[in-house]
Image (cartoon, rainbow, N blue to C red):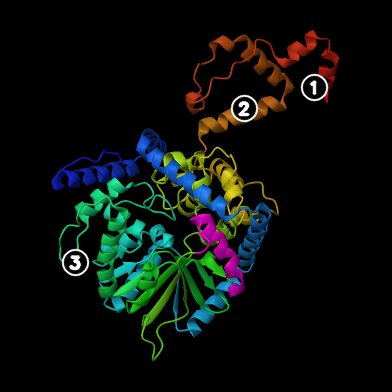
Amino acid sequence: MTQIPVTQVSAADMAALVDREEHDFTDMQRRHFNARAKMALENEALRASFLGASNFLVGKRKAMFPDDAELSALRDRGEAIRQHTLNNLPDLLQRLETNLTANGIQVHWAETAEEACCLIHNILQDNNARTVVKGKSMVSEEIELNHYLEQRGIECLESDMGEYLVQLAKETPSHIIMPAIHKNKEQIARLMHSRAQTSDGQAVPYSEDVDELIGNARSILRDKFMTADAGISGVNMAVANSGTLCLVENEGNGRMTTTVPKLHIAVTGIEKVVEDFSQVPDLLTLLTRSATGQKITTYFNMISGPKKPGEKDGPEQVHLVLLDNGRSRIFNHDTLKPTLQCIRCGACMNHCPVYARIGGHAYGSTYPGPIGQVVTPQLGGLQKHGDMLSACSLNGACGDACPVRIPLPKLIRELRSEAVNPDVNHLTADSIRQVFSPVLGRGSKRTLGESLIWRGWSLAHRQPWLYRLMTRLLTRGRKLLPKKLGPWTRSRSMPQVAARSLHELARDRGVANELNSGESQ
């Protein structure tokens, strides 16, 4: 992640710079969230890259929605579509499987990430597939599919330009739409020259020309498309009534991945289903304009089955892996259920002032930014990912930007509460489902010291005599109080206790009777 100025250096020195950046990334990922955030804040070049990209994307999105009333109406329709899906999810998934199967697509269900990876590996093994080209898929990043396949001797090459670059750098995506947003053209030029090879085994010539860089990568990938045994892709929307998989992309790599190899495997979360094609246009409009500020993407692929007799193009087999991986648990939590409305546009990240300053890698998860703060602790557990919930000022920008109106600030507050509230002894009708489908790691961030402090605070405010004693001790001994108060005073001044309490000041002004009356009540 260290920014090093580009100078006239040898190929060996250039490779050393790339290795240094890889080392810095690895070192950053091993650290605690607070340490990662601090490292990112200290990297001025990284901050400049993210802030510039965020401002650019926010401006493009705003230009696509000049009419506030029209945007509000479109967001209402998008929210209604996604809520309709969640309200009917079990039925829609059954309908989707029925129609996909009728179309010749083989459907597989995976409860966990490990099960999904195993299913995909078995499909590849059954077809003697040793080389894979892969389109952009956040779900495959979530289950760490590339690592799983590589450990078993299967070459898995990313074909999206951004994903290809972070794979070369041995990093993870820093944005769900633009994976390599954290790299500038000089870093990409060094990376391509040091680690990419042409079809004849030669190093890619060093160039900082963007068109030439893209052309070099395209040439490498084109050979892989033609020789790969299988293609793996994600899914943006799965249409239940027709059994159609919809894939949105700009580079053509998705179309090549899903049509050139003889075997196509799609993988997606169970929430990505819609009922009918009539619901697709509104979601597509919201997705493309919110993600990249485009009216429409270059390619909109609709996959309804394998190649039929007489057709020249298309795979001979199509498989769909439907992944749960904690989504059913989210589905059964009334408050957190809107998490599954997400269409993965990245708008919340682009508008988030925290993300714009620390970048995606600081979060240490597949999904960064506001949506990552909501999704990741629910999938991986609050005990492991609960610290990222502190990377939010609750300014509300993410909720205002979300095209399908996910109440992200509300969900972040709910998860903060879940992280420190293990008490499930007092059940109500509204909370029973949450109790039996809790967030993983519930209460894991609550400490004994914090519990004792809040219990003491609660007791003092329920007992008037104890409250008076506490305020008297604080006012009289205020000069003995510490000057620092843990994390609170890292960026804030220590609160100063007044010399006299409000009750004492009120009595001096002759309102003692009213105070005593209030205390007796």
Circle 2 crowding by C-alpha within 10 Å: few under 14, some 14–19, many from 20:
few
At mark 1, the secondary structure is helix
Q: Main secondary structure of the magenta part?
A: helix
Which residues are the magenta region? 275-296
**Of circles 3 and 1, which is in front?**
3
Q: Earlier in the sequence, mark 3 or mark 1?
A: 3
SS at badge 3:
loop
User: Residue 10 occupies which quadrant of the picture?
Assistant: top left
Place of residue 422 in the rendered image (x, y in percent of width and height, measured from the top left): 56, 44
- Judging by the rendered image, the residue that carries numbered circle 3 is 199
Please name the amino acid that badge 1 sits on.
Glu
Q: Tell whether 81 sits left or right of 162.
A: right
Residue that label 1 marks: 519
Determine the residue positioned at 49% across, 40% down: 354
Coordinates of residue 493 in the picture (x, y in percent) = 53, 20
Q: Earlier in the sequence, mark 1 or mark 2?
A: 2
**CA distance for labels 3 and 1:** 84 Å
Amino acid on which disc 2 is placed: Gly
Q: Does the magenta stretch include residue 292?
A: yes
